[in-house]
Amino acid sequence: FFYSAKMSEDSSPPPTTEPEKETTDIVTDADIEEMSQKVLNLQEEAARMEQMVQEISGQGKTTALTPLEKKSTDERSVYVGNVDYTTTPEELQSLFLPCGIIERVTILSDPFTKRPKGYAYVEFRDKSAIPNALELNESLLHSRPIKVVTKRTNYPGMGMRRRRSSRRGGGGRRRRAPSYRYQPY
């Protein structure tokens, strides 16, 4: 809003069209009771929302497993290979349900394309279900023979030694010139 009218030298405010009303609001006990009830309702709703946020954030947090817990989990799990891309975790669960009580079914997917990678892991509650699950090796799921083996424990750094060098004709031992503390000549 921009006012560009020239004001007179006495600088009196422009006349208003509405007469000013002098009102006095009287607050009754009923109004106070109604407002306090609204405040209580809002506080209860805020407490419920805070509890829901804590429950949701608590579900997202995963604690890091100790090596012993990780080994125990791996001993109770099987790897399922050659899984069809349209297979759901519920279908795998129904296939492995006769073997024992299932804790978790994980179908891994590519992080970029969001498509399944073609293999899954099934974790059982106890180790006694593993031999029963291994009997399902070469059984058909979506008319594809699946591969069921025990899950191996992944050790960090083990795969680095087996990589081949990118040099052509590599495979030989790389020789370096000896490092001298002084110039030889």
Image (cartoon, helix red, strand yellow):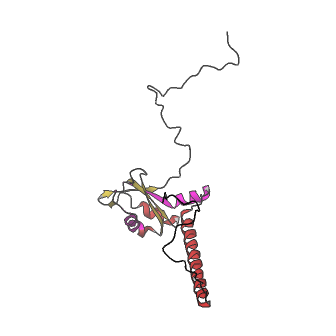
- Residue 84 lies in the magenta-colored region: yes
Outermost residue, front direction? 9
**Along the horizontal axis of the image, is 40 left or right of 140?**
right
Q: Residue at x 57, y 78 (%)?
A: 42
Q: Nearer the viewer, residue 54 or 4?
A: 4
x and y, in percent, of residue 43 in the image: 59, 78
Q: Where 59 sits versus 175, above or below? A: below
Q: Residue furthest left?
A: 143
**Residue 11 in view, yes or no:** yes
Classify 177 as above or below 75: above
Q: Is residue 120 left or right of residue 11?
A: left
Question: Which of the 4 image quarters holds residue 180?
Answer: top right
Q: Name the residue nearer the viewer: 105 or 34.
A: 34
Bounds of the magenta span? Answer: 67-96
Instruction: Report the number of discs.
Output: 0
- Residue lying at 29% horizontally and 59% vertically, measured from the top left: 143
Residue in front for this viewpoint, 87 or 95: 87
* Residue at image coords 53%, 57%: 74
Residue 80 visible in rendering = no
Q: Residue 14 appears at what percent x and percent y?
A: 52, 67
Quick one: quadrant of the C terminus? Answer: top right
Please say if 101 is above or below 109: below
Residue placed furthest toward the top: 185
Quadrant of the rendered structure where residue 140 is? bottom left
Counting from the top left corner in percent of width and height, residue 175 is at 56, 22
Q: Position of residue 26 (x, y in %)?
A: 60, 87
